[in-house]
């Protein structure tokens, strides 16, 4: 297959970079300017697209040393990357609202607003990093913002520059946690981190204030709520009750839950699907651990004259919430340094994995196999290992499995048996398909212990629920007969738990939340009349019964103090509900001539054919 370079960790990549790059690339002078990619996370830079990877691997290996250096140089790059989602190439049609066309600029501005709004609402993460996790959809959000902006224009809603500036100043102060920050610094340290501008920020601020006015107009019904109804709502949410609860736990019945052999076999047959072994994949892999590169990058960091300034910039950017477990700013900054070190070690590992994979594709004419992967690894001074069968449902002792790894592994086929470099939680990998193992039902004897354990838990849960149901009947009858709840508990040998008085608006009850979800407990309690017991409520651990002792008098003094704020919140909630109904109705019509609405219609038409 031809000779292969030595890809052992750090012996080529880091040493060449550390010797050459500080002078060739003027790294120290560029660090404060290049400040974006560390915060986007190493995964997005190393999980190269097939197109990009395929293009690069056609070039000579010398190109990779430049790429490796560039990746490390940009470890704190927060600069703008230009316009995202530019659909104008090829004459893209952005649709129209009310017969009025949507321009490229209008769409672009709305998309930037949507990205910036996501950044603020997510606590400082851009959609490229966290959007998938929170269901971000740029097209949907952009068209909705265009629609609302057009509605504000039609209704003559205009926010003055002074008012928008004051709101913008408030938002900047919240982001800087009350510390002074000029608009220029805000633009450089915050907005530029995601390619946003001051104009985007000003437009977002004005439009959000306009939407509040639009909510007031569209949701005018909230102002019509009579004061007596508001007081009734307050009383409902804030009247406290005094209660006791008896829990019934399956753990009290485990010892008595026997498992006869014939019952175990029957239980296994009834729940065979629970024990079925899923499809598994066994792979040959070459691993590039992040930790193999930490010493090299640590030495590089120690040589930076402006390291403290870099760490301070990242600390200000990420904010104290990012390192909430830190006990002091100094400890948080130490964690910033650790994060930078780990992120860059990951990039070095990914870079070496890319170099290795490129060499493999080159020597196999872009047709690598699992066999050539193993032999090329040996020639390169690396070790190719064969994994245990992987299902993605069980932890692996060989590598820290994440979604990237499992997605790549299960996408392997005999026609495409080798992955491009994949970034895991602890290393970069190149995988080759060894074999696929189909789903199967294991023999009963091989899972007998697990079946016995599951059977015991199931029987114990049934016993706990039977006990709880019997107690509920006995308690109901006992209270009717004039017995006290304490006497009933003594007879049943149960110890009730007495939480602090609580209302529907209570958000925390530690004694209760250890055993059951709070809202479920409150639902049972407030569905029960004072002096009675609730129905038995089953849970995963067994179940519970609530005894409502009394409904406590409403604190009138507290109500008078709380009522203005409660009234405002209640009216705002009604405004929002009315606005949502209005928006749903109006947007369905207003956005029908945009790609946002055309795509679902086309999909439905295709499904009917």
Image (spheres, rainbow, N blue to C red):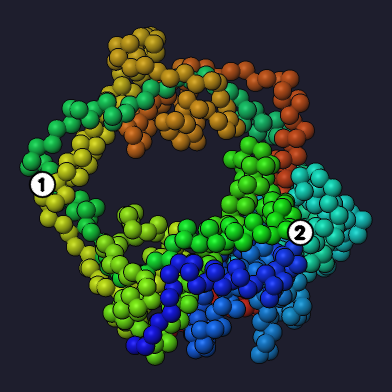
Residue shown at 56% from the left, 25% from the top: 502
Residue shown at 65% from the left, 69% from the top: 73
Horizontal side, residue 282 vs residue 337: left or right: left
Looking at this view, name the residue that lies furthest to the front: 19
Separation of disc 2 and disc 1 at Cα? Answer: 65 Å
Residue beneath disc 2: 189
Q: Does residue 443 appear in the picture of this structure?
A: yes
- Residue 333 lies, in percent from the top left, at 66, 47
- Residue 403 lies, in percent from the top left, at 43, 62
Q: In which quarter of the image is the C terminus?
A: bottom left
- Residue 68 lies, in percent from the top left, at 57, 73
Q: Which of 258 and 82 is in front in this view?
A: 82
Q: Does residue 43 appear in the picture of this structure?
A: no
488 to 133, vertically: above or below:
above
Q: At numbered mark 2, what does the secondary structure look like: helix, strand or loop?
A: helix
Horizontal side, residue 52 vs residue 533: left or right: right
């Amino acid at each position: 297959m031809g000779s292969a370079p030595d890809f052992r960790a750090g012996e080529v990549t880091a040493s060449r970079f550390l010797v050459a790059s500080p002078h060739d690339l003027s790294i120290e002078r560029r660090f404060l300017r290049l400040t974006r990619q560390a915060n986007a996370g190493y995964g997005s830079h190393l999980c190269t697209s097939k197109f990009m990877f395929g293009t690069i691997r056609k070039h000579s290996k010398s190109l990779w040393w430049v790429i490796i250096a560039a990746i490390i140089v940009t470890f704190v790059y927060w600069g703008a990357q230009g316009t995202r989602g530019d659909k104008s190439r090829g004459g893209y049609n952005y649709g129209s609202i009310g017969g009025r066309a949507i321009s490229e600029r209008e769409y672009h501005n709305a998309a930037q607003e949507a990205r910036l709004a996501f950044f603020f609402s997510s606590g400082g993460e851009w959609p490229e990093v966290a959007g998938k996790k929170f269901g971000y959809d740029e097209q949907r959000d952009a068209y909705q913002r265009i629609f609302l902006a057009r509605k504000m224009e039609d209704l003559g809603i205009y926010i003055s520059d002074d008012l928008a500036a004051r709101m913008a100043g408030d938002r900047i102060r919240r982001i800087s946690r009350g510390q002074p920050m000029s608009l220029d610094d805000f633009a450089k340290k915050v907005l530029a981190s995601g390619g946003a501008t001051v104009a985007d920020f000003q437009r977002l601020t004005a439009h959000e204030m306009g939407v509040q006015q639009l909510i007031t107009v569209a949701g005018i019904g909230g102002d019509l709520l009579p004061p007596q109804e508001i007081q009734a709502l307050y009383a409902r949410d804030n009247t406290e009750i005094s209660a006791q609860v008896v829990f019934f736990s399956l753990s009290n019945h485990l010892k008595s839950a026997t498992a006869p052999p014939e019952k175990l076999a029957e239980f296994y047959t009834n729940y065979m699907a629970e024990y079925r072994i899923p499809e598994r994949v066994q792979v040959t892999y070459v691993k590039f651990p992040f930790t193999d590169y930490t010493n090299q990058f640590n030495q590089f960091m120690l040589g930076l004259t402006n390291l403290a300034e870099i760490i301070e910039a990242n600390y200000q950017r990420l904010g104290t919430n990012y390192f909430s477990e830190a006990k002091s700013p100094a400890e948080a900054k130490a964690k910033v340094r650790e994060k930078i070190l780990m992120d860059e070690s990951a990039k070095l590992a990914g870079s070496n994995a890319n170099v290795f994979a490129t060499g493999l594709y080159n020597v196999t004419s872009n047709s690598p196999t699992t066999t050539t992967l193993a032999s090329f690894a040996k020639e390169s001074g690396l070790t190719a290992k064969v994994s245990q069968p992987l299902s993605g449902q069980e932890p692996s002792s060989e590598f820290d499995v994440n979604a990237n790894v499992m997605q790549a592994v299960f996408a392997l086929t005999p026609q495409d048996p080798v992955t491009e470099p994949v970034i895991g939680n602890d290393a970069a990998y190149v995988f080759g398909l060894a074999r696929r193992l189909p789903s199967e039902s294991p023999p009963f004897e091989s899972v007998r212990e697990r079946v016995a354990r599951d059977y015991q838990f199931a029987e114990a849960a049934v016993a706990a629920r039977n006990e709880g149901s019997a107690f509920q009947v006995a308690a109901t009858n006992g209270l009717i007969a004039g017995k006290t709840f304490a006497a009933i508990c003594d007879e049943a040998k149960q110890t009730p738990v007495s939480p602090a008085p609580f209302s529907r608006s209570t958000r925390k009850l530690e004694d209760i939340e250890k055993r059951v979800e709070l809202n479920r407990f409150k639902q049972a309690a407030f569905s029960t009349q004072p002096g009675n017991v609730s129905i038995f409520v089953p849970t995963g651990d067994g179940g519970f019964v609530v005894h409502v002792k009394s409904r406590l008098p409403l604190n009138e003094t507290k109500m008078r103090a709380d009522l203005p704020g409660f009234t405002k919140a209640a009216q705002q909630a009604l405004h929002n509900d009315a606005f949502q109904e209005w928006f749903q109705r109006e947007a369905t019509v207003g956005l029908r001539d945009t790609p946002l609405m055309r795509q679902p219609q086309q999909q439905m038409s295709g499904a009917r054919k």
